């Protein structure tokens, strides 16, 4: 392969912008070729890879191991209308209400109608959901009008589901899986995505050509200094898609979970909402249940509502935590139903049965994402997205609990159906890759500088673009992030460093869109625009990269038409 005259570029645009990452001298390059390259091994990536492999040659790349995903940590379960008393219509109504007027109703309809079939399929693939007397046990969570959360291993749903999908994938041998391989960037050819470049543990680079690429890279909770998300959640998929020219939507919406264990751990332990579903209380410093009277569903109000009330309590009581109280619940039941939480707390010196547990909000679920239709198609030909990386429109301005694993399943499977159509006709011809290679590797930034940079992004976002935002604070955040960006050398080939650049990209998008949305809605709370403003803001925000200048373009998107009433 020639190393001169690039005809193929990476997504960073211009001529072979991957150049800085690769040195001419001693560069080791491997090549792979697939019909479908899936980036990410969580529920969305596994579902897409498994389905696509029935017809196509599929590669799956994941930057950690298959058990280092957000999916693996999921506790509460998966929402679906599985009970004879329930129906997709009820699930739809609850989702629209929680989404505060910004859900795409047609996408939600797809989610709730196809959800039950996906749950049954998981069971066929070997997932044992918890049952009593042969019937699924359905849990209750915030803003659901009835019990509808299927769960497995008590509160170990994510690991049980992911393990069964991984078993099928690895035992079938139909998907070529590459763990511990970090995807740096997408390869573009004439505006079409034709593969990706990745870096393995030994520092070797692989050029993977693919007729279609599926981004299933999860979320970006690590943008915040306090998060329930695992270390892999650094918004790489969002940043890569952005560099490739894709449109991203609603980047200002990051859901904070009300009940993460108080403290400085990263990630912090989540105390699933299902605990409150089983009757646990939230107490303030005086021992009062502050959600009673604040919302008809008390502790089971939508997450955005609970977080807002916690925020008021913090300001009133000059504190930064409240208490979760499960002492009145049966201890054997707690141990059996919540082994992950009970055990996790015990490891940290807390007893769920007899003690009040200090909790505070932490970034948890990224609603913003790569804009897709209901078939996983992004605005870039050949590039698909599903799971937390995508924005299908189902969450509106506030995700309904336990709808995200379902989203990965439903839209992962629909992406496969669309791939089957696309690949049957798409031009398969990407036959050569030419890269201009730099003479010397880039030095990059010292690991200490990188660690400090990550800390700075996390703190800046938590303090200035966290639960409560204001014009002044957002201005300060934008300045601080720009200053950090300017202070850094261009990245070398260290994963933490590349992640920092992706975190910065996503953080700047979040700040820009949060500044633009001059209202309070769902998870986006502005102290200077405290009211919801349907006249001007029942619409999305969009971000993309100007191909000519490379600048970030932030725009108002289309108006949402559904008539659902938000829960406010
Ligand atoms: C503690 C916790 C509990 C939760 N509980 C629930 C719940 O009960 N129910 C529910 O519905 N939702 C829950 N959620 C949310 C839900 O788990 C996630 O939204 C969902 O699992 C995301 O799945 P995913 O497939 O999109 O991404 P993930 O599961 O996060 O997988 C992302 C994959 O992408 C890979 N990746 C990322 N970047 C790169 C890169 N540059 N190169 C290569 N690979 C890359 C990662 O290695 C990983 O394999 C919970 C979240 C947390 C944090």
Image (cartoon, rainbow, N blue to C red):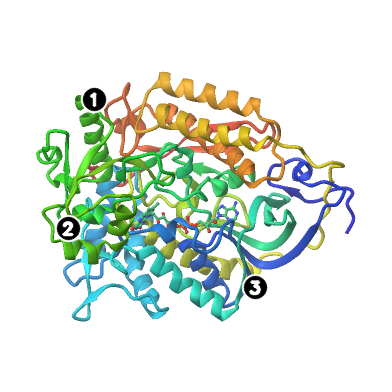
Residue 378 spot, x, y in % from top left = 55, 52
Residue 462: image quadrant is top left
Distance Cα–Cα, label 2 vs label 3: 45 Å
10 Å crowding of disc 3: few (<14), some (14-19), many (20+) = some
Q: Earlier in the sequence, mark 2 or mark 1?
A: 2
Judging depth in this view, the residue of 484 and 186 nearest the camera is 484
Q: Quadrant of the C terminus?
A: top left
Image check: 169 left or right of 294? right
Residue at the disc numbered 3: 57
Look at mark 1 in the image and give the residue it sits on: 318
Instruction: Give the mark, 2 or 3, whose residue is nearer the N terminus.
Output: 3
Q: Give the SS element for disc 2.
A: loop
In front: 211, or 149? 149
- Report the residue marked by disc 2: 278
Q: Quadrant of the N terminus?
A: bottom right
The residue positioned 23% from the left and 43% from the top of the image is 565
Q: Are marks 2 and 1 in contact (CB under 8 Å)?
A: no
Front-most of residues 459 and 6: 459
**In terms of image quarters, where does ligand 1 lie?**
bottom left
Say if 542 sits above or below 41 in the image.
above
The residues bearing labels 1 and 3 have C-alpha atoms spaced at a distance of: 58 Å
The outermost residue toward the top is 472
Say what secondary structure mark 1 lies in: loop
């Amino acid at each position: 392969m020639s190393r001169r005259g690039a005809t193929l570029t990476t997504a960073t645009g211009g001529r072979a912008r991957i150049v800085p990452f690769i040195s001419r001298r001693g560069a080791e390059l491997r090549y792979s070729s697939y019909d479908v390259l899936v980036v990410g091994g969580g529920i969305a990536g596994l579902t897409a890879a498994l389905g696509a492999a029935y017809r196509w040659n599929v590669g799956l790349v994941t930057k950690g191991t298959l058990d280092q995903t957000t999916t693996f940590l999921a506790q509460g379960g998966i929402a679906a209308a599985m009970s004879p008393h329930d129906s997709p219509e009820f699930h739809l109504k609850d989702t629209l209400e929680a989404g505060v007027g910004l859900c795409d109703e047609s996408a939600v309809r797809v989610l709730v109608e196809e959800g039950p079939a996906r749950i049954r399929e998981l069971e066929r693939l070997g997932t044992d959901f918890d049952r009593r007397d042969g019937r699924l046990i359905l849990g209750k969570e915030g803003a659901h009008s009835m019990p509808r959360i299927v769960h497995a291993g008590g509160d170990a749903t994510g690991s049980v589901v992911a393990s069964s999908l991984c078993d099928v994938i690895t035992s079938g041998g139909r998907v070529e899986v590459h763990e511990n391989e970090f995807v740096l960037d997408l390869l573009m050819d004439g505006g079409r995505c034709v593969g990706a470049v990745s870096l393995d543990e030994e520092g070797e680079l692989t050029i993977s050509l693919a007729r279609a690429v599926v981004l299933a890279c999860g979320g970006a909770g690590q943008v915040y200094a306090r998060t329930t998300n695992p270390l892999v959640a650094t918004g790489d998929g969002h940043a890569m898609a952005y560099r490739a020219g894709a449109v991203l939507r609603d980047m200002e919406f990051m859901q904070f979970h009300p009940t993460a264990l108080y403290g400085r751990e990263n990630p912090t332990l989540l105390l699933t909402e299902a605990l409150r579903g089983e009757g646990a209380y939230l107490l303030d410093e005086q021992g009062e249940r502050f959600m009673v009277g604040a919302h008809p569903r008390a502790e089971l109000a939508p997450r955005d509502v609970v977080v807002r009330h916690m925020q008021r309590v913090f300001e009133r009581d000059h504190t930064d935590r409240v208490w979760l109280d499960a002492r009145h619940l049966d201890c054997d039941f707690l141990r059996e139903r919540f082994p992950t939480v009970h055990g996790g707390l015990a490891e940290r010196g807390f007893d769920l049965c007899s003690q009040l547990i200090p909790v505070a909000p932490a970034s948890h679920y990224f609603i913003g994402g790569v804009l897709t239709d209901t078939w996983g198609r992004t605005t870039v030909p050949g590039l698909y997205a599903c799971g937390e990386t995508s924005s299908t429109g189902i969450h509106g301005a506030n995700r309904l609990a336990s709808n995200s694993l379902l989203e990965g399943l439903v839209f992962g499977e629909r992406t496969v159906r669309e791939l089957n159509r696309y690949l049957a006709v798409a031009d398969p011809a990407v036959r050569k890759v030419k890269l201009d290679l730099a003479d010397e590797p880039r030095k990059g930034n010292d690991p200490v500088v990188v660690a400090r940079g990550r800390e700075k992004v996390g703190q800046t976002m938590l303090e200035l673009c966290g639960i409560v935002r204001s014009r002044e604070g957002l201005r300060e955040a934008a300045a601080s992030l720009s200053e950090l960006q300017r202070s850094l050398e261009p990245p070398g080939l260290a994963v933490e460093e590349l992640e920092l650049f992706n975190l910065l990209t996503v953080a700047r998008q979040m700040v820009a869109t949060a500044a633009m949305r001059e209202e309070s809605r769902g998870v986006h709370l502005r102290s200077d625009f405290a009211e919801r403003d349907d006249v001007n803001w029942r619409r999305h925000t969009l971000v993309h990269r100007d191909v000519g200048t490379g600048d970030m373009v932030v725009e108002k998107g289309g108006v949402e038409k559904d008539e659902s009433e938000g829960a406010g």
